[in-house]
Image: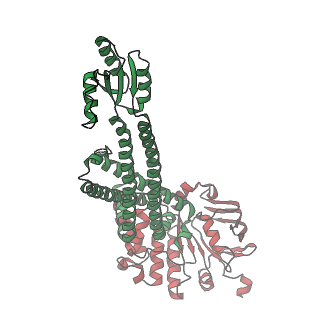
Amino acid sequence: MLNPSSVEFLVLEALANIRRNRLMAFAAVLTAGVSLAVSAGFALTAIAVHRACEKLPQEFDMAVYVRRGTPPGKVSELKETIAALPGVASVTFISKERGWEEFKRSLGQEISMDDVLYNPALDSFKIRMADPRMSAEVQQRIRKLPEVDDILWRQSEVRFFMGLARVVGIAGAVATVVLFLGSAFIIGNTIRLGIYARRREVSIMRLVGARPSFIRFPFLLEGMLLAGAGAVLALLLIRLAGAYLEALTGDLQSITRFLDSGVAPWQLAVLLMSAGLGLGALSSYLSVRRYLKEGTAEAAAQ
Amino acid sequence: MIEFRGVSLVYPNGVLALRGINLRVEKGEFVFIVGPTGTGKSSLLKLIYREEVPTEGTVLVDGQDVGAIPPGEVWRLRRKVGVVFQDFRLLPDRTVWENIAFALRVTGASARQIRRRVPEFLELVGLTHRCDSFPSQLSGGEQQRTAIARALVTDPPILLADEPTGNLDPDTSWEIMQLLERINLRGSTVLMSTHDSEMVNRMRRRVVALDLTGIARDEQRAYYHAESVQR
């Protein structure tokens, strides 16, 4: 439908629009960049905290004590049974001898256990979970096994972190959506101001019989260019903030090793770019459509 | 070509602009719309290019009910109707050439068509030598001639001129009038609203006079005022 000269005209028109309204375009890129950076930065932080909250409980091992007098064959069977349970990452056997030594060592020099003549410890398993959400269920199933004497696990800690992960996840998602809508509103408004500034052109286009899609196109392109530039700016801001945070927390590896969003830089770039372009296209489409519906050709020209 | 059947127009603020208008304009006619301010001359023209929709009755252009055209399809009607205004409405940051080419560009003309048609219409309105000037560098008459070229360059069969000489001195007005007459002789149907009685009297064309009750008079080869007043 469009001939090459029309395409050239539309693209040049969009670029000329940006040049003519340099200040407004600069403001739009800046607001789009900052709001995209804030919403993406918030999303990344929320994802990192969410992941940390999910990962932390993996550090809490579950201890399963074997009933005294269980024959060694049954003990290795038990190990296999537990290892086969869903959500279990690893099962380590700790003999009662090693357990007793570790217990004595944990007491240190202050209290001597040398007078205790028999080993009160039980054979045990240290269980590490791959998916801490399964802890409660795994714990229940292990408790039912006849060879099991008792289980020790940090139920309340696991629950706390799991709950925290859920809250951070939901709050992060809501805040990201709200910030994203905010950016859409700002870009849409900028495009609207741009249309208002060029209402005479738009009115003449309508008067001489330009198709509505033809009138919309330069504004859509302009919105996408501005929001796309905003996305590049946002990417830059996030990288800068990331580098700054890294420099700041360089010595706190013990804390920061948990804080990883798991989003690769290229994924972030693709996400931000598509978010920016989509945002620009959608918000300018809505603005132009509303404007074309509201304003009549003549009223707009005056 | 253009037909009004029992058309009334009431604006949303309650102002009654037109009442019971019945009018038929044939292809190739030249019609003056005259009447005091507030009798609906501009409104009548707006109904033809669907800037307004009648409250009652129908307006037909080329047999099509203009009021029934869906908003997304109005552009098709606009390509049949060129419009010129008293205040020219040129784009101040574009040259004469660009102002005229703009109408072609936004209606999807090719670069070749633009290169061919713009000089043709610059010549028609006598502005070939001013094609690189900006509107602010032109006289009122030159600006109006640019606006006329822009309205016609897409080849609409109808030209509506809403007080096109309202801002011009008598000599320039007469030049514009002669240009519109030439355009009419080329085959365009021209409807022009005006207050300029001298020009209407000199031209002796069909005159449709509006007053607050509707069409007060519709005569061929007529004067601005009823003939009895002229004598």
Left or right of A172: which side holds B55?
Answer: right
Which quarter of the rendered picture does the N terminus of chain B lie within? Answer: bottom right
Which residue is at the front of the view, B104 or A275? A275
Which residue is at the front of the view, B12 or B190? B12
Q: Number of numbered discs present?
A: 0
Q: Which chain is red?
A: B
Residue B27: percent from the left, percent from the top?
A: 58, 64
**Which residue is at a point 37% across and 71% down the rendered structure image?**
A23
Farthest residue, direction front? A115
Q: Which chain is green?
A: A
What scheme was used to colour the molecule? by chain
Image position of B227 with respect to A103: above or below = below
Residue A125: percent from the left, percent from the top?
A: 32, 24
Left or right of A281: which side holds A89?
Answer: left
Residue B3: percent from the left, percent from the top?
A: 65, 62
Residue A25: percent from the left, percent from the top?
A: 38, 66
Which quarter of the rendered picture does the C terminus of chain B lie within? Answer: bottom right
Which residue is at the front of the view, B125 or A138? A138
Asked if residue B199 can be seen in this view, the reply is yes
Image position of B164 with respect to A84: above or below = below
**Which residue is at a point 34% across and 65% down the rendered structure image?**
B115
**Which residue is at a point 41% across and 17% down the rendered structure image?**
A145
Asked if residue B184 can be seen in this view, the reply is no
Image quadrant assignment for residue B207? bottom right
Farthest residue, direction right? B213
